[in-house]
Amino acid sequence: MTHFYRPSEGHRLPHDPFNAIVAPRPIGWIGTVDAEGRRNLAPYSFFNALNYSPPLVGFSSNAWKDTVANCR
């Protein structure tokens, strides 16, 4: 059986293989504070260290969540 991937057609697999590309996926705990001073701590598996000096860590979210809103 051959499987050819065309992004416009989707992967046609029972589960999205993207999450299995990097393993193990460490979890980054991102802590933020909103405008009213409420704290939020959330796990993110899509994060990375981007620079050493100055220290810079980036993360991405697949939806507009409290962490994203607090960062903005």
Image: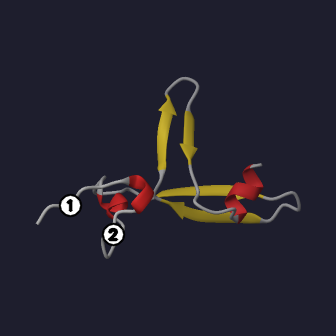
Work out whether residue 29 or residue 22 is closer to the camera in this orientation and state it: 22
Residue located 33% across and 73% down the image? 15
Q: Secondary structure at mark 1?
A: loop
Q: Position of residue 5 (x, y in %)?
A: 30, 55
The quarter of the picture where residue 11 lies is bottom left
Q: Position of residue 51 (x, y in %)?
A: 51, 28
10 Å crowding of disc 2: few (<14), some (14-19), many (20+): few
The quarter of the picture where residue 42 lies is bottom right
Figure check: 56 above or below 16: above
Q: Which residue is mark 1?
A: 3
What amino acid type is highlighted by mark number 2? Arg
Task: Specify whether 58 is left or right of 35.
Answer: left
Q: Which residue is mark 2?
A: 12
Check the image and name the residue furthest to the left: 1
Residue located 40% across and 61% down the image? 9
Work out whether residue 21 or residue 36 is closer to the camera in this orientation and state it: 21
Work out whether residue 11 or residue 26 is closer to the camera in this orientation and state it: 11
Residue located 74% across and 64% down the image? 39
Q: Mark 2 and mark 1 in contact (Cβ < 8 Å)? A: yes
CA gap between label 1 and label 2 equals 9 Å
User: Mark 1 vs mark 2: which is more N-terminal?
Assistant: 1
Task: Specify whether 68 is left or right of 49.
Answer: right
10 Å crowding of disc 1: few (<14), some (14-19), many (20+): few
Residue located 72% across and 64% down the image? 66
